Image (cartoon, rainbow, N blue to C red):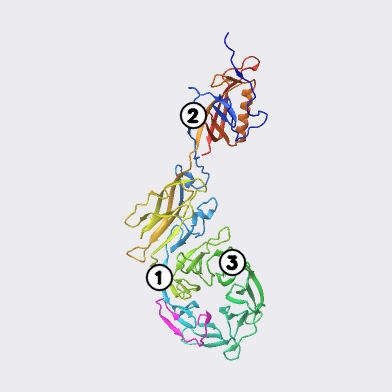
Amino acid sequence: MPAPQSYITHTLPWSLARAVAASTLFQDVTNIYDFALGGIPFLSEISAETPLIRGSAQFKKDQFDNGLEPGEQSLSGWWLRSQSSWHLGTGIVNLDVRLDPTAEFRYADSEGVNPWIQGSMTLLKGVTQLDTGGSSVRCLGVQVGGDDYVLYADDDDLFLIDGSGTPAAITWGGSGQIFSIATDGENWFALSTDGIYTGSLSGSSGSKLWSVAAATHGVVAWLKGRLVAGIDNSVYELIPGSDPAPHTLPTPSFTHPASGFQWHDLTEGPEAIYAVGHGGTESIILKLTLDTNGLLPELTAATTAAELPRGELAYSIYTYLGNFMAIGTSRGCRIAQISTGGDLAYGPLIETPEPVEDFVGVGDHIWAGYSDGFSDGSSGLIRISLRDQMESGRYPYAKDLKCPDTGRVMGVTTLGASGRLVFAVAGSGLFVENQDDYVESGWFVTGRIRYNTLWPKLFKFYNLKAVLDGPIAVATIDTSGNEVQLASVDSNNLTASDLAINFPSGPQEFISLKFTLGRSPDDSTSAPVLRGFQVKALPGGPRPRQYIVPLRCYDHEMGRDGSRTGYEGWALERLQLMEELDSSGDVVIFEDLASGTATPVTIETVEFRQMVPPGNNSQGWGGTLTVVLRTLS
């Protein structure tokens, strides 16, 4: 008689009474199994009809477009990102529209470029130095006889300067430092240590109008038909009486209780006059209303219109268009809305490296002094657009004109009524915006192009749309901050389509693009205009693999060594465990016991096929179990 076949009847090394842990490894002490999944052992069912298939899994899903307008989401193949307008200014980190809807029209940083015309990026005008300056410089745009000038105070000197830089000295009547200047359109006013002086804009000399006792700080302004002064910690309404000049200061309209408090700026709104100052860590914006019962309205009640966050000190205020107030502080500037009744509601801070000491408005924009903030440490202006308030409450802004020197920007104005910007820098002097000539070059850096995912990308090509009245150089900046120039296109090189991105060479989480625009080498009044760009990329991470594995799943099976294993109900128990793992969606370990590999996978499908009916009493139940597995990377 033939020898009886051997059967393995011992308990298998895992419990069928509990869910199998996804990270379970099978201990193949018998060395008869081919595969294990989630710690559950199986023999192979590989045949010509049921092969094991191993291949690339789908790693990129089709894009779905449910928008009303076509866009990059409507295209297939490349991952695309483009921009064709930058009119919401600077300040973003990532160029991810899903995270920030304004990112489509913003960028990270810039110098020397003008983004404010929708659909274009070009150069700003350059600046010309009109005069040198000392440690305290102030400027104010005026007109004299229909011509444009700047009233310019330089320490203890006062000048009228035209657009060519020709100064006309004014013998203003005093000898101390000039703290502040103002005008009523026909006359100038200058506040110094011992008084307030005045003279005609068309004249060359002045005299003392009000006497001041040893002022250490102050500001003067012509507001609502009268002269108003903030001297040390008091605010005065200066309306001359019958007594001859120089007049004695009247009773203050308001005196701050702290003797060390100083008023720094004055302005007017539709219904009130405002004064701003600080002492210690406290800053307030004071509102002085007008009593209109008499022939000449007089300042009466003084109330606090706004307080700044503790430690943020106020330096300047500027009302514009009757509705906006720009507030300059030790940390930057804010734009406030003036409500009915004169109260203020200010928005988020636009940060600057040094205090903002002056503003001027032209058209839809306000310019603010920007001290020591450019990449080379120089000073100039930032521009704030009032056309588009963003959801955060902040108004768009960007760096603007710059001078070649460092120093505090103490004054910002225009050259008369021309609209050409002028700013005064302590230690350097007075600078005016060029009428026609552009800066030699300017640049801007895009937000991080990351397609709203941390998955690595292969950045391959970029396209440009531009009017090339001058060169445009393009560089990439990788995740480590390394900058490498890719190409430069100009009027002699009009090929700007599918240009190669050859750095960085491998997969990157993100890149930024830096565009450098240069004015025409033949004409300083011509500059290129960038209309838009597009970047093409592909997913660059490890590609997932897919396994289709046929497994034997019967109550009784013969192992690789010829021994038999199993028991009644074993096939159904393993099938139910596999269905349980499939339902959990968890990561499981797929073991190829013959090769000794263990791979984390997810189960995509489980399919069981029973090809023949079981024997009597449901004995011999089983079939082929096919699992489709996907690696994690």
Residue indicated by mark 3:
336
Asked if disc 1 and disc 2 are in contact, CB closer than 8 Å, the reply is: no
* Residue 351 picture location, percent across and down: 54, 64
Sequence order check, earlier mark of 3 and 2: 2
Q: Name the residue at 44% across, 84% down.
A: 169
Residue located beneath label 2 in the image: 53
Residue 395 rendering spot, x and y as whole percentages? 54, 62
Q: Are the residues tagged 3 and 2 within 8 Å (C-beta)?
A: no
What separation in Å lies between label 3 and label 2 (alpha carbons)? Answer: 66 Å
Q: Quadrant of residue 433?
A: bottom left
Residue placed most toward the observer, 66 or 588: 588
**Which of pointers 1 and 2 indicates the residue nearer the eye?**
2
Q: Are marks 1 and 3 in contact (CB under 8 Å)?
A: no
Label 3 residue SS? strand
Classify 530 as above or below 234: above
Closer to the N terminus: mark 1 or mark 3? 3
Front residue of 351/470: it is 351
- The amino acid type of the residue labelled 2 equals Ile
Q: Residue 435: give its label.
A: 1
Stretch in magenta? 160-186
Amino acid bearing label 3: Ala
Q: Is residue 172 magenta?
A: yes
Q: CA distance from mark 1 to mark 3?
A: 31 Å
Marks 1/2: CA distance? 72 Å
How far across and down, in percent of the image, does residue 303 sit? 66, 73
The answer to whether residue 574 is seen in the rendering is yes
